[in-house]
């Protein structure tokens, strides 16, 4: 008789206490602090906070200009950060990464630089799930060249309805700009189909990755997109820096958006020529310290066990969705299942304004967000003015979710 196979070792559990210890705010605020507004901004990790403080207090100088050693060190640290961000995104080369002040700045660069190539009647295809920062820049830049904005509708779960893509993508479509993950429903977009559609008509695919990157590294090559934007403050770095990845061949062709110092080759009163990317898109002094902090966050995050973190975040999402389902008068928005969904949930409490929900939750130490979340077209589609959102990050635990659910029971008891 052959020997029974040795039992597989149980998968090691996530060291949540160790992970939380890497985020100084938890020790600073102590017990009873339940931060569930991660989709608005994540808490800063120690690696980023230390890198920021070290730069600002021990190594501060402007970049790309001085020839003294301190300035050279600052430039090297800044360029190292660019390389760390590029690695987190799976970019081929660091020079494909433009340092911005965040997603909004990045998407404004994308819109204004790409629209400069469009003709009247050309079409920009967005979706109804977009954050305003992936709508308004296209409206502003598109109006200048007479481009037309069209929108992908949503299905009953709030996902992009890609069944109607054939009718929406035509030879006039020059840009498709969509979110990788909705900041209201958590739905993750099937970028494969959109990439294929974009290729079939020679359009460019722009992706708003603001809500996707806090849940692990991405691979922009595999995503088959052309531009990818995100904010550092949602990726556990400081406020003030983000990035725009632009595929190299495209970046070489695109005109700059903002003009000023450090983005030029030669300036005369009659006209200017521009530096190569990424510097062409980085007019003026960049957010040096925040970019260095973002690089440090990317390097630290890249070393984590994301399979385990993903399982942890999904278990918390499951706990949250199941719990919400048991509270009378609470209606979650978005996909019912856990597949292709980030760990964030928006919901409506019948008869109670989201701001009142948030205030009562805050009295219990639970931080959530109420409002339209800068996604009015999405709320319009769902027939809502506003909602309350709870968003989970890698450091959250079951106590955070349970505190929210207990708080909601009280909201319903007292206000509904
Ligand atoms: N896109 C999405 C999906 C977002 O959730 C946000 C912020 O909430 C943004 C863009 C804008 O990010 P920022 O304000 O950091 O520029």
Image: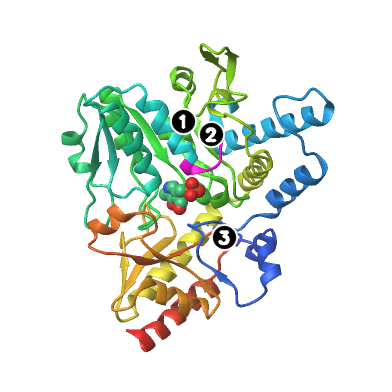
Residue annotated with mark 1: 221
So how many labels did they put on this image? 3
Left or right, 400 with reference to 116: right
Whole-Å distance between the Cαs marked 1 and 2? 7 Å
Residue, x 50% and y 32% (percent of image)? Answer: 245
Element at label 1: helix
Q: Position of residue 162 (x, y in %)?
A: 23, 42
In front of the other: label 2 or label 3? Answer: 2
Position of 172 with respect to 131 (left or right) is left
| Lower sequence index among marks 1 and 3 | 3
Determine the residue positioned at 42% across, 32% down. Answer: 110
Residue range highlighted in magenta? 100-104
Instruction: Locate residue 243, reporting x and y percent.
Output: 54, 37
Q: Is residue 256 magenta?
A: no
Label 3 SS: loop
Label 1 crowd (10 A; few <14 / some 14-19 / many >=20): few
In the displayed orientation, state which residue is furthest to the front: 269
Q: Which residue is mark 2?
A: 90
């Amino acid at each position: 008789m052959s020997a029974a196979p040795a039992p597989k070792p149980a998968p090691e559990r996530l060291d949540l206490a160790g992970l939380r210890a890497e985020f100084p705010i938890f020790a600073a605020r102590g017990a009873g602090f339940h931060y569930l507004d991660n989709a608005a901004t994540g808490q800063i990790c120690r690696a980023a906070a230390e890198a920021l403080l070290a730069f600002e207090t021990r190594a501060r100088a402007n970049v790309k200009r001085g020839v003294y050693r301190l300035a050279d060190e600052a430039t090297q640290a800044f360029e190292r950060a660019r390389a760390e961000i590029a690695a987190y995104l799976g970019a081929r080369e660091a020079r494909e990464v433009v340092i911005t002040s965040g997603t909004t700045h990045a998407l404004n660069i994308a819109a204004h630089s790409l629209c400069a190539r469009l003709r009247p009647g050309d079409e920009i295809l967005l979706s109804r799930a977009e954050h305003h920062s992936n709508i308004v820049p296209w409206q502003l830049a598109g109006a200048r060249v007479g481009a037309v904005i069209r929108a992908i509708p949503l299905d009953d779960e709030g996902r992009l309805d890609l069944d109607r893509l054939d009718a929406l993508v035509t030879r006039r479509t020059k840009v498709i700009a969509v979110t990788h993950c909705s900041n209201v429903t958590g739905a993750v977009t099937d970028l494969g189909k959109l990439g294929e559609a974009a290729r079939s008509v020679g359009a460019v695919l722009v992706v708003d990755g603001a809500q996707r990157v806090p849940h692990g590294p991405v691979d922009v090559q595999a995503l088959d997109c052309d531009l990818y934007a995100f904010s550092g403050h949602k990726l556990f770095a400081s406020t003030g820096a983000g990035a725009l990845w632009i595929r190299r061949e495209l970046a070489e062709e695109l005109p700059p958006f903002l003009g000023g110092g450090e983005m030029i080759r030669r300036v005369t009163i009659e006209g200017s020529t521009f530096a190569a990317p990424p510097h062409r898109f980085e007019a003026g002094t960049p957010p040096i310290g925040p970019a260095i902090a973002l690089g440090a966050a990317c390097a630290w995050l890249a070393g984590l066990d994301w399979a385990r973190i993903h399982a942890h975040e999904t278990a918390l999402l499951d706990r949250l969705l199941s719990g919400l389902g048991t509270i009378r008068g609470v209606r979650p928005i978005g996909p019912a299942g856990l597949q292709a969904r980030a760990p964030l949930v928006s919901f409506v409490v019948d008869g109670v304004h989201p701001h009142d929900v948030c205030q009562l939750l805050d009295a219990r130490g639970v931080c959530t967000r109420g409002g339209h979340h800068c996604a009015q077209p999405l709320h319009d589609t769902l027939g809502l003015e506003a909602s309350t959102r709870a968003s989970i990050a890698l450091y959250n635990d079951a106590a955070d979710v349970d505190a929210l659910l207990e708080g909601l029971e009280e909201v319903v008891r007292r206000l509904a």
